[in-house]
Image (spheres, grey):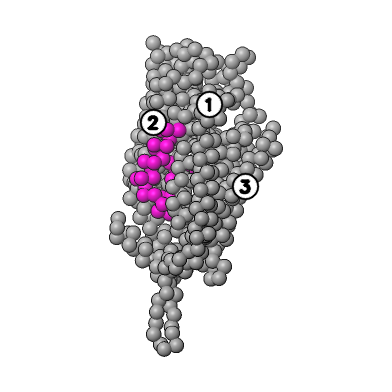
Amino acid sequence: MDLTLIVVLVIVLALFFDFTNGFHDTANAMATPIATGALKPRMAVALAAVLNLVGAFLSTEVARTISGGLIKEGDGGIQITPEMIFAGLIGAVCWNMVTWLFGLPSSSSHALFGGLIGAAIVGAGVGAVDFTVLVSKVVLPALVAPIVAGVVAFVATRLAYAITRDPATGRGLGRGNFRYAQIFSSSLVALAHGTNDAQKTMGVITLTLIATGAQAVGTGPEFWVIAACALAIALGTYTGGWRIIKTMGTGLTDIKPAQGFAAETSTAATILASSHLGFALSTTQVASGSVIGSGLGRKGASVRWRTAGRIGVGWLLTLPAAAAVGAVAALLVTIGPVGIVIDAVLGLAVIVAIFVISSRDKVTSGTVVSEVDAAVGAVRTPKATRKNRKKKRQAAE
Amino acid sequence: MIDWAAFAIVAAAALVSASVVVSLFAYGLRLLNVGRGLDADDSPGVIETTPSGSVTVVSGQPEGRPRWATIAAVACFALCSCAVLFGIYLIVPFFHAS
């Protein structure tokens, strides 16, 4: 009886995590096209949602290897119980909500790993976690991902500007048209995201079903699990994490179409290279690095390092913070069924509280656009035509 | 501990592929502007004062682009499309699962 209740709780919580994953990561693909006006905000999140939905159905490779040796399982290892997964998910969801409240693009995967690690340490001791794997697969990639993406985006931005510079006058030629390319480059990022991130939740649910004997060992995710996860991440994506889109689209640097295209292409290239040449990198960190790199690449653009620093601190905290929450949740679980109920109630309270706090200063698609317009207006341009074009567009909206 | 060789390959592949795609699209845009005045997007239009004193505004209107430039630009965009298709090919495991 308890077993089925906990399984239902895990599935619900896992799907909610998937939802937060969706709205957390909309910004990775769509912050830059929204910032440059390549796509209207609503259109952009709808496109990202559809691509995430499609992407989730495309592959189950990641789902099959979710635990990936991070937590020692099987022979000589520890038994992963649904209770521990539940506690880990609470840690992951809480941390995702907190970073969303502050508009920080943090890695949802790190939150998930952190939560599970914290729960595993409480449930089975420090020996349950393979720290060598943790450092080589999670910590170091997190450090190098933004650097690689940043360098690639810097070079790409420089190239884009150099090639489209009129040798006679030094002025730009047709740079606004990079907008059209942005639609494709950002769509690629959204699709790649869908094939990766929804699967983490599928993996967690499947792991739970296998652990409780509801599913045979060694089998892949059931179809209803895939469908539910795909829907949850698409819904989350469509809801749009406007806070994070605002940070990435306008908070780090003011993005122009050529930069946006260079940044998205760099993100797509880095992610595809990493997932196919065997060095896994986090989408969020790659995308943030690309935006900063493209900011450094355009002459006259400035990067707001204070915002970048805030994001960096968020990244450093993600894993330990989610682990701490996961550990506390796991401690409560050890009490017994009462602990699970307390966990569920506390988790729900945190989620509701954050939604209430967030509603005080709502960030919606409308706010993001006006922020973008304000940012564009703040850039001093002596060129009359650009201002006119801007006014025309504002009048049309 | 960390596979630096794999890391170097990933970094190099990302750098080369992103640079190539961005360059191709940029050259495409550049070629579309061959034989054209200043781009309407970035130029304010040039104000010229003739010796007689009259003022004319020469804006960036298309003035006829040579055929070779159009063909080359389309080729650049086509190559970019190939890159996008290759990206989709890489993302969808169905295409390369043996």
Q: Which residue is mark 1?
A: A61
Between A44 and B4, the residue placed more toward the observer is: A44
The answer, for residue A342, to whether it is visible in the render is no
Q: Which residue is mark 3?
A: B16
Name the residue located 42 percent from the left edge and 37 percent from the top edge: A51
Pair 2/1: label in front: 1
Element type at marker 3?
helix
Name the residue located 48 percent from the left edge and 41 percent from the top edge: A188
**Residue A111 percent across, percent down from the top left:** 50, 33
Q: Main secondary structure of the magenta part?
A: helix
The chain identifier of the residue carrying mark 2 reads A
Residue type at the position of mark 2: Ala
Judged from this view, the residue extending furthest toward the front is B67
Element type at marker 2?
helix
Between A247 and A389, the residue placed more toward the observer is: A389
Instruction: Check if mark 1's residue and mark 3's residue have beta carbons within 8 Å.
Output: no
Residue type at the position of mark 3: Val
**Which of disc 1 and disc 2 is earlier in sequence?**
1
The chain identifier of the residue carrying mark 1 reads A
Q: Which residue is mark 2?
A: A232
Name the residue located 67 percent from the left edge and 36 percent from the top edge: B6
Q: Cα distance, mark 2 to mark 3?
A: 35 Å
**Residue B59 percent across, percent down from the top left:** 42, 71
| A40 in the magenta segment | yes
Q: Are labels 2 and 3 assigned to the same chain?
A: no
Image quadrant holding the N terminus of chain A, namely top left
Q: How many marks?
A: 3
Q: Quadrant of residue A103?
A: top left
